[in-house]
Amino acid sequence: MDAFLKVEDLSRLYRSARSEPLLVFDQVNFSVQKGEFVCIVGHSGCGKSTVLNILAGLDEATSGVVVMDGREVSGPSLDRGVVFQNHALMPWLSAEKNVAFGVRSRWPDWSRQKLAAHCQKYLDLVGLTGSEHKKPAELSGGMKQRVGIARAFAIEPKMLLLDEPFGALDALTRGLIQDELKKICAATHQTVFMITHDVDEAILLSDKIMLMSNGPRARIAEIVQNTLPADRRRDTIHKDPQYYPIRNHLVDFLVSRSKQFSSSDFPDSYNPRQPPLVKPGLVVADCGAYQGADAQQPAPPRHVDKVVANS
Amino acid sequence: MIVMTRNVRPITLSQFAIASMNKSSTYRAGLLSLAIFGLILLIWHLATLPVDHTIGGDSEYAKLMGGGETTASGLPTPLQMGEAIWKHLSNPFYDNGANDKGIGIQLAYSIARVLLGFALAALLAIPLGFLIGMSPLVYRALDPFIQLLKPISPLAWMPLALYTIKDSTISSIFVIFVCSLWPMLLNTVHGVASVRRDWLNVAKTLEASVLRKAFLVILPAAAPTILTGMRISMGIAWLVIVAAEMLVGGTGIGYFVWNEWNNLSLTNVIFAILLIGAVGMLLDLIFGWLSRLVAYQE
Ligand SMILES: Nc1ncnc2c1ncn2[C@@H]1O[C@H](COP(=O)(O)OP(=O)(O)OP(=O)(O)O)[C@@H](O)[C@H]1O
Ligand SMILES: [Mg+2]
């Protein structure tokens, strides 16, 4: 099956009059299947937001193509809903009007009642029943972010793009909204591309975690397949034997390996067209010891049995 | 370039008071205001106590000034002032020919000129400011002209206006137009140009049409800044109309002041000054109220 979203040889060069041109990333290749939840993690400044903005159509790649659902992405579209890092709600509109703004664009000839009912449905979905008529200034940070999510969901996009949606929230609120997001995405089979700095968030939510190396000339260094059972829950996830191997793998990448991948000395086996797909959750998890090199190899079947036994 | 952002709104003393005091101290401030007012009246009363004037020349002059009742300084007493205020306000709209019109009529002329000039300026400045604010190219092309024209005193246009327009009323409206133009234009440009990128990106990703973007995103986002510009413009316009009417004569509160000065009626001059202040305050209050309507909290 052809991938729903295909990113090929994407690069972004910033030219400026005062300094050297900056090649933020190049040869970025990845694909996302329909209904898949994909996270991208990487150090600050490696170009994650730039990738997302290119997917959204808000920024233009210097080279490379993005193809979604068989069509090349050129410019923003209602097919891709974006949740911005700082919610980006319009402060002069109530929560409901913020959601309605996009819905009106999507279905311009809907009646007022139909529009209101549609907005209400999505505000209820994110747990904002009763706060529809409040202005963003009267909402808490978590509630604002929920309005942002409702706004993106309400246009029923083919794909959802989230740029560190929960970065500014406290741990408790973040957990609550993560659960909600997970529920909604599972129910609607939403295809999602999300940026996060939170390794646990990535493991909880995503099917695939893309690791981006440090810039300049950042690339997708590795793609980690999340092999935890789909019905994983925030309160029990850490009891799964696969959890710590995956988590350690991600943390290890962020702490030490991402540096090695920079300065363009990738291993010889590395092919930017096809970044290695690893399954650290399926690697022998004896005493939780992490075996970095083995992670590159596809997991032998006996580990799969083990996972099945555990789940 | 000097831009007025909405963070530098003109702040009145009472706004300051409300922001920094609680209810009971607002009440105390009111009492203090009353006391200060009483003190001013008292000083005024003492300063204008009647004096014995037996020295000849002085008496003649005093007769000229006060029309019989004389005071030490030639200024009216608080009581005379009160009578004059009552006289003017009880019959504001009489019209006994060119040089003797009720104060209401004079004020109406001035306000009408200000509103007309101001409205014309708004009609040009706000759409033009929108255009300039949205397009860096247009901004750079027009900036030198704006920079050159902005510092010119609006009254400096008067001779040119009188020569080309040949009508004193239209000339004074033109002067109001010119002086109202710049603050509104610059604030609109600034407000439109500094709309948060995020909101524009939201509008883009939600595929809002150009009109929806302009009226539902940019306009409300820039409205507080635009309104601040309008408020500053209105303040300047009200300052300028008095001077303009003094220059061109005929009608209006500025002309009234000048005329009463020629009549040597200080009472009427002071009355007009107070009235100019009151109307200016009222106009500012209206714009303060309008700004609160469009204000939003981020
Ligand atoms: N307009 C610009 N002009 C020049 N360089 C830019 C511009 N925007 C971004 N960059 C550079 O591009 C790089 C990537 O920026 P980007 O915002 O995509 O990083 P990020 O991975 O999202 O970081 P963070 O995790 O902190 O959000 C940064 O090094 C930044 O300096
Ligand atoms: Mg970012």
Image: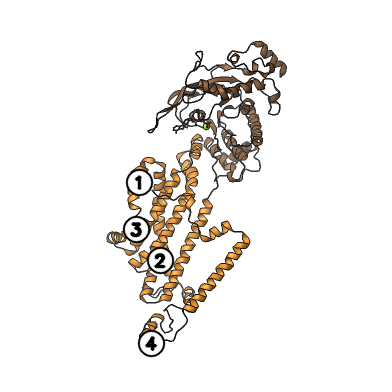
Q: Position of residue A298 (x, y in %)?
A: 60, 13
Q: Are marks 3 and 4 in contact (CB under 8 Å)?
A: no
Host chain of mark 3: B
Q: Position of residue A179 (x, y in %)?
A: 66, 31
Instruction: Identify the secondary structure beneath mark 3.
Output: loop
Tell which residue pokes out farthest to the left in this image.
Answer: B163
In the visual, does A176 lie left or right of A3? right
Q: Residue under circle 3?
A: B153
Q: Residue under circle 4?
A: B55
Host chain of mark 4: B
Q: Can residue A300 be seen in this snapshot?
A: yes
Q: Which mark is residue B109?
A: 2
Q: Position of residue A217 (x, y in %)?
A: 46, 24
Which label lies toward us, 3 or 4?
Answer: 4
Host chain of mark 1: B
Q: Can residue A30 be seen in this snapshot?
A: no
Which label lies toward us, 4 or 1?
Answer: 4
**Between marks 3 and 1, how big is the CA–CA gap?**
18 Å
Host chain of mark 2: B
Quadrant of the snapshot with the C terminus of chain B: top right
